[in-house]
Image: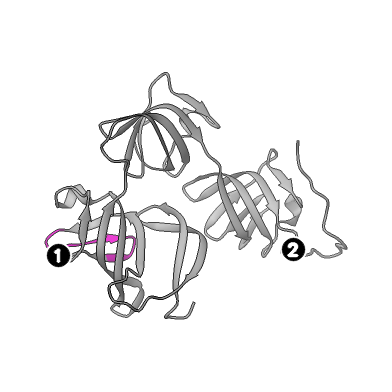
């Protein structure tokens, strides 16, 4: 992307502010100085209240002149780990390194459900922290389970950092008491970037594992080659996807030697 192009990157926040991108869209650059041109969402690390800065991944955020929404009092150990939405107008490279950027923030907003109790709360996201097998966080929201919690698409032991969940329950004092937890499949799409062996390959930085119960549509495990465009459904934990289904994009999938036509679907009922 040329140096002056502005893009919007959508994806999942993982680790300390890294984003697993699922969509990159070219945006119109606004020259007006008062227009927020940059937006980033991630977890705060290395908060320095005396300097009024913190980090999201390798990005340094300067919030000296920013409006702060719903954030607690400033101290090192209170802000670190919070999930925030930041808008700013100026992004500059620090020391000439493209990986070291500094954003001047106009607004910093805490992400969460708010403080109003509710009998019917529904939240969706990735597990960011485990306090115990029955006590964890989705982003900034704490979730507590009990013996009566119902599970769909998985079991209690499947709840680990990085797993995608939808949680139903009651919101009391900012904590969701879960009545139902649904383990959601991840949806990854893109070209195969590396093949380790049959059934193990990479989409970008995500390793994909297939098994004897993985459903293949539009091809077979033998058609997984570098450059093949696939869509993978499954659970992603610590950067590894256990695939329940792999779909080939026919128009993008490269032809293997000796193949005259795309193979028929190999869908397991």
Q: Residue at x 14, y 58 (%)?
A: 49
Is 189 a magenta residue?
A: no
| In-front residue for pair 88/98 | 88
Residue occupying the point 72% across, 46% down: 216
Please provide the residue range marked out in magenta: 49-60
Image location (x, y in percent) of residue 79: 21, 50
| Residue, disc 1 | 51
- Which quadrant of the figure has residue 143? top left
Residue 219 position (above or below residue 91): above
Tell me which corner region of the image, top left, top right, bottom left or bottom right, holds residue 115: top left
Q: Position of residue 150 (x, y in %)?
A: 48, 24
Secondary structure beneath label 2: loop
Q: Is 146 left, or right, of 164 in this rendering? A: left
Which residue is tagged 2?
251
Q: Is residue 70 above or below residue 159?
A: below
221 or 261, which lies in front?
Answer: 261
CA neighbours of label 1 inside 10 A, class few (<14), some (14 to 19), many (20+)? few
């Amino acid at each position: 992307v040329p140096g002056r192009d502005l893009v919007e990157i959508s994806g999942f926040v993982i680790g300390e502010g890294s984003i697993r991108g699922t969509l990159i869209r070219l945006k119109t650059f606004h020259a007006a100085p008062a227009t927020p041109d940059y937006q980033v969402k991630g977890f705060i690390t290395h908060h320095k209240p005396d300097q009024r800065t913190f980090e999201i991944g390798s990005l340094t955020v300067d919030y000296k002149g920013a409006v702060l929404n719903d954030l607690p009092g400033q101290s090192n150990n209170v802000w670190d780990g919070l999930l925030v939405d930041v808008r700013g107008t100026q992004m500059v490279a620090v020391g000439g390194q493209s990986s070291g950027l500094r954003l001047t923030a106009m607004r910093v907003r805490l992400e969460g459900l708010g403080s109003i109790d509710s009998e019917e709360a529904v939240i969706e996201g990735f597990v960011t922290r485990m306090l115990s097998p029955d006590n964890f966080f989705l982003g900034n929201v704490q979730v507590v389970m009990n013996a009566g919690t119902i599970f769909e698409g998985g079991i209690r032991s499947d709840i680990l950092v990085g797993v995608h969940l939808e949680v139903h329950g009651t919101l009391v004092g900012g904590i969701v008491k879960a009545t139902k937890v649904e383990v959601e499949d991840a949806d990854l799409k893109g070209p195969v970037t590396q093949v380790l062996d049959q059934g193990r390959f990479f989409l970008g930085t995500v390793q994909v594992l297939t098994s004897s119960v993985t459903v293949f549509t539009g091809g077979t495990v033998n058609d997984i080659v570098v450059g093949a465009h696939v869509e993978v459904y499954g659970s992603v934990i610590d950067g590894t996807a256990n695939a329940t289904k792999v779909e080939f994009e026919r128009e993008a999938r490269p032809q293997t030697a000796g193949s005259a036509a795309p193979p028929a679907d190999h869908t397991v009922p």
